Image (tube, rainbow, N blue to C red):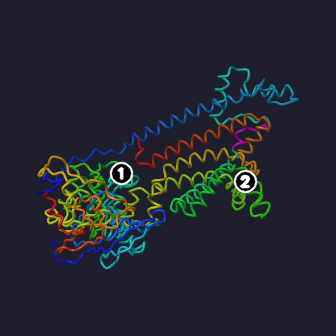
């Protein structure tokens, strides 16, 4: 673990809003986290919790269009990602920060050979000839263990399986040796056995290339496999952040606690699956106080107050207004 | 506890050395076969067209020879027509001798001009082909550019204006567009010549000037149709995941639009271009008449007035052949553009 290094990415007070019938509605709000070089941060939460929105706004895909706005800062290598102009964004994307998406089946262009698609991303950032770019693309395909890469570079995406397509997308992402990779649910759409292969590949890539990674998932099991730290998101906010082992051992926020309890595990097989009653609020109805309070079994009247993410020990933060005093109630 | 929904077992760490997947690239013979099928289909269509065109003579009421010769014709004239049409023989013999002539480039002799029909048509063909080519190029260039403009500015003012123009373009008949252009640009402002034609071999500049207005009149509907098709397919493509992937690689908006979106949108566009070219050839008949261009269309209209059946047959046959060829080419282009349809 790289403990003392300065963070590679430092996000502070990220807020992304959309224009909803004339009113600004926050999708993501008060989001702060940092990622150190070579570190993997898991961004965990249910659908709609704002984890993808956060990542997309760092890449310039959210918050910049009409009817959207963003505020906060995202310091990355001396720049603020949220304030890059179009040209700066384009030279950053795929070069310093690369992204792998959820849907390998639709994320590759059906009309171009995969080798060409990888090479296209190389030629944007490096001054190489088409032939050199093709060679580098084949190398990248080799690195992500696509069998007979040289031949497969001339195949079209529909000639690949889902797992192989995700490998192609990973090859695309690492082709320019980025310092950071954002993986947005890269295994969610894949078969379980293939999921494990892709996770293993990502682990290998980040170790070999010293990649820092933001790994977005709703699957706590995947977090345990691949992440060093995790940030749990609920209703557009981070509710808890910390080291993976410490957080799994003793979750500080009731939502994290419920999320971990809801995870099926053979080791702790109970009578029935745990679940959280109710559903997360829509951005238009975010409560003024603790956003999880309406579903929280430890709720008190004082939970109506606005919340802040507080550091409770070095590297660990919690948004629960009750701190960890709710824990005693858990056993009863 | 070890909270792992998924554990990476050592066996899975290493992706199995799978046998290289069988290349699913289409073998050349497959491509040849599909081309062969299409050629065969086109030939059958051609046979059907010849039967229909030949059958035109049967549509003339009464004794075709008498009605074709017109009022006050001499018995010699009627007899000549009778001989030329081979009216004494059974219909299938007539058909085969006519088809045989057609295949050897003999389309009969004009009743009115008394010259071989093939010569008449061939002398008019460059006019019509110039006009059609001019019009289709204009339609493709302006239609696709306007479509891209709309697609990238969807819902904004530029899109709305373009869409209104193209809706008007589709709804307006080409002869009316032609007449308006003629009144404005020729009669009022004297920018372009009103009527007539100069062969490109004589004076390219004059050729161009004579074709601008008729080409615009002819291209309006096709261009509008292409604008709509481009707008809808490109804006759909731009919302696809793979466009986001390309943007995430750092490709510029412009590169993504001109390389990725256009190639993905090309197959449906090629279909529309093919179809519109066929429609445009039909429309050229009227537009040629409006601008008094001495093309095949004018020849066709005149031959109807003059009841010159061989000319009419030749023009219909020619147009049908063009349509067959265009459809064949469209199919072929579609196959080449879309890697997934290579069956």
In the rendered structure, the residue with mark 2 lies on which chain?
B
Question: Which residue corresponds to mark 2?
Answer: B178
Report the residue marked by disc 1.
Answer: A156
Write the start and end of the magenta stretch as one range.
B113-121
Q: Is residue A80 visible?
A: yes
Instruction: Please provide percent x and percent y for residue A149.
Output: 27, 55
Few, some or many residues within 10 Å of mark 2 (<14, 14–19, 20+): many
Rendering quarter of residue B326: top right
Q: Quadrant of the N terminus of chain B?
A: bottom left
Q: Are marks 1 and 2 in contact (CB under 8 Å)?
A: no
Asked whether B222 falls inside the magenta stretch, the response is no
Q: Going by the image, does A316 lie left or right of B97?
A: left
Q: A262 or B170, which lies in front?
A: A262
Q: Nearer the viewer, mark 1 or mark 2?
A: 2
Residue drawn at x 68%, y 46% is B283
How many marks the image carries: the answer is 2
Q: Which mark is residue B87?
A: none
Residue A207 seen: no
Q: Is residue B132 above or below residue A62?
A: above
Q: Secondary structure at mark 2?
A: helix
Considering every residue shown, the one lying at the far right of the view is B72
Q: Are marks 1 and 2 on the same chain?
A: no
The spot of residue A176 in percent (x, y) is 30, 67
Q: How far is mark 1 from mark 2, CA to CA?
A: 46 Å
Towards the viewer: A94 or B71: A94
Q: Residue at x 28, y 73 (%)?
A: A9
Q: Is residue B119 magenta?
A: yes
Label 1 secondary element = loop
């Amino acid at each position: 673990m790289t403990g003392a290094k300065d963070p590679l990415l430092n996000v502070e007070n990220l807020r992304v809003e959309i224009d909803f019938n004339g009113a600004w509605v926050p999708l993501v709000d008060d989001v702060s986290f940092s990622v150190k070089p070579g570190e993997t941060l898991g961004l965990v939460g249910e659908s709609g919790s704002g984890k993808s929105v956060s990542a997309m706004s760092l890449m310039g895909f959210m918050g910049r269009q009409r009817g959207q706005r963003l505020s906060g800062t995202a310091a990355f290598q001396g720049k603020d990602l949220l304030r890059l102009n179009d040209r700066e964004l384009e030279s950053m994307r795929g070069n310093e920060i690369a992204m792998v998406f959820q849907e390998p089946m639709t994320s590759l262009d059906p009309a171009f050979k995969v080798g060409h698609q990888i090479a296209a991303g190389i030629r944007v950032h490096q001054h190489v000839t088409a032939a050199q770019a093709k060679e580098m693309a084949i190398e990248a395909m080799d690195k992500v263990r696509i069998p007979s890469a040289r031949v497969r570079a001339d195949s079209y995406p529909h000639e690949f399986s889902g797992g192989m397509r995700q490998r192609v997308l990973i090859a695309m992402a690492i082709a320019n040796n980025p310092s950071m990779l954002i993986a947005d649910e890269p295994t969610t759409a894949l078969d379980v056995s293939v999921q494990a292969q892709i996770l293993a590949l990502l682990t290998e890539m980040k170790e070999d290339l010293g990649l820092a990674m933001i790994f977005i998932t709703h699957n706590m099991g995947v977090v345990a496999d691949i992440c060093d730290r995790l940030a749990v998101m609920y209703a557009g906010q981070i509710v808890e952040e910390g080291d993976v082992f410490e957080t799994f051992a003793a979750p500080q926020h009731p939502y994290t606690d419920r999320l971990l309890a809801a995870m099926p595990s053979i080791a702790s097989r109970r009578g029935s699956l745990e679940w959280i009653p109710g559903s997360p609020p829509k951005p238009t109805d975010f409560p003024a106080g603790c956003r999880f309070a309406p579903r929280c079994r430890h709720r008190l009247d004082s939970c109506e107050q606005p919340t802040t993410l507080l550091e409770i020990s070095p590297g660990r933060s919690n948004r629960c207004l009750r701190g960890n005093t709710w824990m005693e109630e858990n056993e009863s | 506890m070890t909270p792992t929904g998924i554990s990476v077992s050592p066996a899975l760490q290493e992706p199995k050395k799978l046998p290289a997947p069988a290349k699913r690239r289409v073998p050349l013979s497959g491509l040849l076969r599909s081309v062969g099928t299409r050629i065969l289909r086109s030939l059958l269509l051609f046979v059907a067209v010849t039967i229909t065109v030949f059958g035109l003579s049967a549509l003339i009421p009464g004794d075709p020879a008498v009605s074709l010769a017109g009022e006050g014709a001499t018995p010699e004239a009627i007899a000549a027509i009778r001989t030329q049409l081979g009216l004494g023989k059974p219909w299938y013999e007539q058909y085969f001798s006519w088809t045989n002539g057609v295949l050897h480039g003999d389309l009969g002799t004009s009743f009115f001009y008394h010259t071989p029909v093939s010569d008449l048509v061939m002398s008019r063909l460059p006019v019509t082909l110039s006009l059609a080519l001019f019009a289709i190029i204009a339609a493709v260039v302006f239609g696709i550019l306007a479509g891209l403009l709309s697609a990238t500015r969807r819902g904004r003012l530029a899109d709305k204006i373009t869409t209104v123009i193209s809706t008007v373009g589709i709804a307006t008949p080409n002869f009316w567009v032609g007449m308006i252009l003629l009144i404005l640009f020729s009669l009022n402002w004297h920018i372009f010549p009103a009527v007539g034609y100069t062969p490109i071999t004589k004076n390219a500049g004059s050729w161009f000037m004579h074709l601008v207005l008729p080409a615009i009149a002819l291209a309006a509907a096709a261009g509008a149709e292409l604008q709509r098709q481009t707008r809808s397919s490109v804006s759909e493509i731009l919302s696809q995941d793979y466009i986001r992937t390309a943007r995430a690689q750092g490709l510029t908006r412009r590169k993504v639009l001109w390389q990725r979106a256009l190639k993905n949108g090309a197959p449906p566009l090629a279909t529309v271009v093919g179809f519109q070219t066929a429609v445009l050839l039909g429309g050229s008949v009227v537009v040629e008449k409006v601008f008094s261009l001495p093309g095949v269309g004018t020849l066709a209209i005149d031959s109807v007035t003059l009841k010159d059946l061989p000319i009419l047959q030749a023009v219909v046959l020619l147009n049908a052949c063009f349509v067959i060829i265009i459809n064949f080419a469209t199919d072929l282009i579609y196959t080449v553009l879309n890697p997934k349809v290579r069956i």
